[in-house]
Amino acid sequence: MVSVLVQESHTVSDMLLPLDGELVLASGAGFRAAAPGSDPDCGSEPPALFRNPDRFSWVDPRLWRSEEARGFFSVDAERVPCSHDDVVFPPDGSFRVGLGPGAGPVRVRSLSALGQTFTRDEDLAAFLASRSGRLHFHGPGALSLGSEACADPSGCVCGTAEALPWVCAALLQPLGGRCPQASCHDALRPEGQCCDLCGAIVSLTHSSAFDLQRYRARLLDAFLSLPQYQGLQVAVSRVPRWSRLREADTEIQVVLADTGPETGGAGRLARALVADVAEHGEALGVLSAALRESGAPVGGDSAAEQNAPGSRAGLAGGVVAAVLLVLLALLGIVLLRRTGRLRWRRQEEAEPAPAGTPSGFSNPVFFVATSEEPPPVRPCSPALKMDSSTSHSYFDNPLFAAEAEA
């Protein structure tokens, strides 16, 4: 049960069609029947079977594409459409996408498919109930529309946190559902990421003067363009921050990942960003910055591991210190109360997940001009220039833009 766009002419000896489905013929496309052996282009290969059309899931991050500037990436939860996004399926392609199961209905700002753009739930529901809608969207999940475009200069939370288990299940299905082993000690798991990574995380609290787009431009032009930071990948977005005082606050998460053979660059850049906040925080609209850094590389030399943050030698020293403090507390000399924050962290075609497995983008930066100028930096890279008349992004799905393979 699928709709297939046919873009070329094909010669076949016979074809077995499903009970329900459709072939959409592009201009000049079609089929020609030929007796076996009469056409030199037709070999004696076994029958070609159409691949499982139900193997594509809405919550599979590998099937979506967003435009990111060089050096930037998105955490896994933001690689699928966020609640403020406009979702675009190519009008000249065939596709079939599964909705759910999931924690709740998928919510986006608008959806464009088959030459139509839907912005109201009533219109979308009528389309999904139609024959064409059933051929292109299937599954028990729900799809709803109507979110406003993000108009906050500091960005908006993506809104896919509840779907993270299904996102991770789809992403890790080719790996047997397990994350690969991180190549460092004390690896980090950012908010919205499925697996641990090596690098650093800078968490920023901000005022109403903070502009996420301008901060990304500052990172690109003032830091990522420098030779010592080449090869680093950076994700910047607004994410939930959980605390005992306020149930659902937010912060800006800056994830710095080492991707090349050289390690330590992410930590150096993170410390430079913290120093930048100390010097220019007021002009940037940043109130504070907190840094976390992964440990030494696995298999590194002992000297490096002893001096690295979070190394086993440092951990042993911390254990000794903790024991001494506990003894002092037992003696009544000093009483320590520990406070802190505990945070839970997340194109190729994938085969369908096993039965019963949950099928579970960076929230785009929304530019709104403000009167306050940030500290001077070099001119923004063209890759980051955005039309100030728009405050939302478009997601398309290139996987379905090409002709479905037989």
Image (cartoon, grey):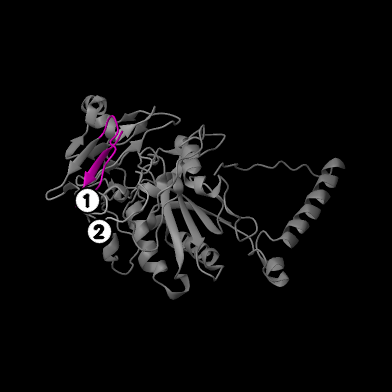
Compared with 212, 309 (above or below) is below
Give the SS element for disc 1: strand
- In the depicted view, which residue is nearer to us: 121 or 292? 121
Q: What residue is drawn where x is 39% and y is 52%? A: 285
Q: Estimate the x, y position of residue 166 in percent, counting from the top left.
A: 47, 38
Q: Position of residue 301 (x, y in %)?
A: 69, 71
Quarter of the image holding residue 351? top left
Residue 216 vs residue 27, the one in the foreground: 27
Indicate yes or no whether the magenta region holds residue 8. yes
Which mark, by number, is residue 127?
A: none
Residue 41 numbered mark, or none: 2
Task: Say whether disc 1 or disc 2 marks the residue closer to the N-terminus.
Answer: 1
What type is the residue that disc 1 sits on?
Thr
Please report contact status of discs 1 and 2: CB closer than 8 Å, yes or no: yes
Q: Amino acid at mark 2?
A: Asp
SS at circle 2: loop
Residue at position x 29%, y 36% from top?
2
- State the residue in front, 275 or 80: 80
Residue range of the region highlighted in magenta in the rendering: 1-21
In the image: residue 326, left or right of residue 83: right
Q: Position of residue 387 (x, y in %)?
A: 21, 54
On whether residue 404 falls in the magenta region, the answer is: no
**Can residue 35 be seen?**
yes
| Quadrant position of the N terminus in the picture | top left
**Image check: 178 left or right of 133?**
right
Q: How many marks?
A: 2
Which residue lies under the disc numbered 1?
11
Image location of residue 83, percent across then percent down: 34, 37
* Point 22% across, 44% down: residue: 5
The residue lying at 38 percent from left, 56 percent from top is 284
Q: CA distance from mark 1 to mark 2?
A: 8 Å
